[in-house]
Amino acid sequence: MGNTNNSEAYVSFQNVQKTYDGESFVIKNLNLDAERGEFITMLGPSGSGKTTCLLMLAGFETATYGEIILDGTSINNVPPHKRNIGMVFQNYALFPHLTVNENLAFPLQVRKVEKYEIEKKVRNALEMVQLGEYGSRRPMQLSGGQQQRVAVARALVFEPKIVLMDEPLGALDKQLREQMQYEIKELHEKLEVTVVYVTHDQSEALTMSNRIAVFDDGIIQQLAPPNVLYESPENAFVAQFIGENNTLSGKVIAINKEICTVEVGENETLRALAVNIEGIGSDTMISLRPERVVVNPENGSYPNIVSAEVIELIYLGDHIRSRMKVCGHDDFIVKIPNSAHHAQLKPGNTVKVGWLAEDARALDAPA
Amino acid sequence: MEQSPDKNILVTADGIPLKTSLARAQRRSKFVAFMMVFPLLFFIMIGFIVPIVDMLFLSIDNSIVNRILPNTVESLKNWDPYANELPDEAVYASMVDDIKKAKKAREHTKIGTRLNYESSGFASLFRKAGRKVQKIDKPPYKEALIKTDKRWADIYTWQVIKQNSSDLTDGYYLAAFDFTRKFTNGKVEPLPEKDSIYIKLFFRTLLLSTLITFLTFVIGFPVSYMLANVPTRISNILIIFVLLPFWTSLLVRTTSWIALLQQEGVINDFLILIGIISEDGRLAMIHNATGTVIAMTHILLPFMILPLFSVMKTIPKSYLRAAISLGAHPWVAFWRIYFPNTGPGIGAGSILVFILAIGYYITPALVGGSSGTFISNRIAYHISNSLNWGLGSSIGVILLVIVLFLFILYDRIIGIKNMKLG
């Protein structure tokens, strides 16, 4: 969770709560700090409250309780048009009756910028997104990717304090989406602008962000850089939501400093990193990334070695995905790299699989 | 696929040119498509195109004189109507002959009725002639005819007949524009101020229709905006209230406005009750232009709201949000971003209301009084009361031309493709 009262925070949500109907919270208790120039992503399933957060920051929703600070001042009572926040919408929200140039000039015109200055800034912004020649076109005459770039340029042209992006790539096809991810990331690094990005696409979040806030059920489940989020999820939701994940549920029977022993299935005991468990006797869920599992390890080389029955093999080119039955769970996935001497498996084989105790994380057992 | 016309014509496997084959393959589906639209096409022909062509024809048709009095028209050819001389004996002889034949065919009153539009008195003149002409069986026909009625000795009578002896006439159009062709000298002159009504009526119709269109826009725009921006569940209910007037008889709606607006009506009583006006100062809000405008604005309002609503529904809410987030005050965002995007709806609603308004008939007839009637009330008068169908048709044609002209103007300025009716 973000540390509150951080003097360096540029954007700060402090104990923010939000309810629409007065009966249930959309945002339960939000504390989030972002530094100047940071690319921070709010990631979560739909209905998790991430878009509400963004709308509160933009000023289109008001916080029921708590304070939102931008650049040292509370913006709770600042109307949205005075917040100086750029926003990129999912459907781009380019104004169809205006040309690209006029779209970009709009935020400058309403700020009463000098005419020659507007022309210069618009031209620069368009060149920045490589659309220099498209200024006189209407948005409808542009492709989806070009419209996206115009929307980004429009949100940046008036040099806002912060840029908000609400699932801006949702309407693009996969290839274009990946290309735009890099372009937006590049712009962010070049302009050193603070970006708050909302998405439900975890790979997008992992690619672009400095830090990711994983939302669920109105609270931030974990706020961390992408690699930490992936490798060290703090709870079962994050582990499940980010990347592929094997889960083995069991009961804690012993704790030895950082390592705990968990009884899984019938008389099978596994050793795992004690991350988020309540104590001996409590239910837990062991989370294990598929690529951290080794097939046919040498005896004694791994603290966890169990036998597994191969159920299904899917050839995916760079790796082979194998579904196995391990400790009574038949949805245990192992990714076998397609290297020169990888294990040759057939469905029905019984093999040994092993992994390090540090790669298995004992987390809270979801209800 | 590209192909040159001479060589390399693409053929199917059996050697028939591809285009021929394609046409053959599509023939059946084209036929089916045609059969599906045929009933409507037929209906439109019978119910729309034929009447309009007929109306166009009626407005210039003047064949009745030539048909019923063929010999007279022939003999009048050599007579100069402006030479201040009565026609010669031959003309009178043909007239007697023509009237005899017309009497037999029972058509002599028709010619009287027709010429009566031009100048009153002709109906009785021809009725009388019809009764007495049988007794005239030998020359001199001139004296004999004049004996039946002195008016046959009046040059004016013959000038009227002469002027109407061609098969086509512009007389109805002249009348519709408050002009007349003098029978005494054949010159086209404007009618005196007290007799000219049509130009005034056309202008009033256009002016009041513009006002009504503007009022429906002013009242309808906020309503449409609200409808488009409340949750669908609520807007569905509210739309019913907009449509409710459609399910109520036009007559009932119009007469209920009479109950509300008349001098002893609800609104006047209420205004007196709260002391805004005195008992002597009851407002005249009905049987005048005010009544027409109020009632028609109400009746035509849905035609403005529905196209506006359907256009506004398609404008994403994010436009306004985007404009505000870009720093525009909500009013500026509305005016510069939202409003221009409602253009197609405003265009469609306005043209719909305006065109309906300038042809409106029932409401102005009931609540318009003398200052609030429209040109269509005049058409109705000529079609059903004075039976001067020619004049009625010519006014109808002028109205049609005005509508077409405005439509073209609209297309030039705004573009018909930008219109959205729902």
Image (cartoon, coloured by chain):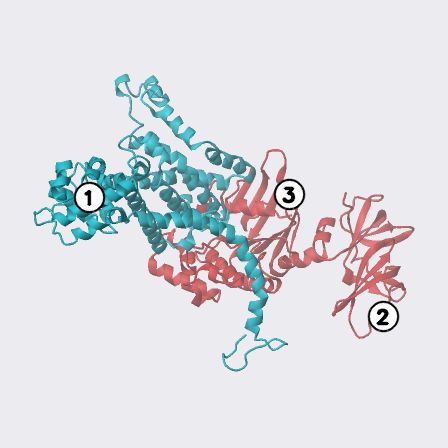
Task: Pinpoint the chain carrying mark 2.
Answer: A
Q: Identify the amino acid type marked 2.
A: Gln
Cα separation, mark 2 vs mark 1, equals 123 Å
Quadrant into which the N terminus of chain B falls: bottom right
Measured as percent of width and height from the top left, residue A139 is found at 46, 59
Residue B96's disc number: 1
Any part of residue A348 in sight: yes
Q: What number is the disc on residue B213?
A: none
- Say which mark, if any, is on residue A218: 3
Colour chosen for chain B: cyan
Look at 42% across and 28% down and name the residue there: B252
Percent across and percent down for residue A196 are 56, 53
Q: What's the colour of chain A in the image?
A: red
- Label 3, secondary structure: give it: loop
The answer to which image quadrant residue B125 occupies is top left
Q: Check the image and name the residue furthest to the left.
A: B84
Taking the view exactly as shown, the residue that stands out farthest to the right is: A267
Residue A281 rendering spot, x and y as whole percentages: 85, 43
Q: CA distance from mark 2 to mark 3?
A: 46 Å
**Nearer-the-camera pick, A79 or B358:** B358
Q: Give amino acid for label 1.
A: Val
Badge 2: residue crowd in 10 Å (few <14, some 14–19, many ≥20): few
Marker disc for residue A344: 2
Residue at x 52%, y 78% (from the top left corner): B3
Type of the residue with mark 3: Gly
Q: Please name whichever residue, A122 or B201, is drawn nearer the observer in this view of the structure.
A: B201
Taking A242 as reference, is A154 left or right?
Answer: left
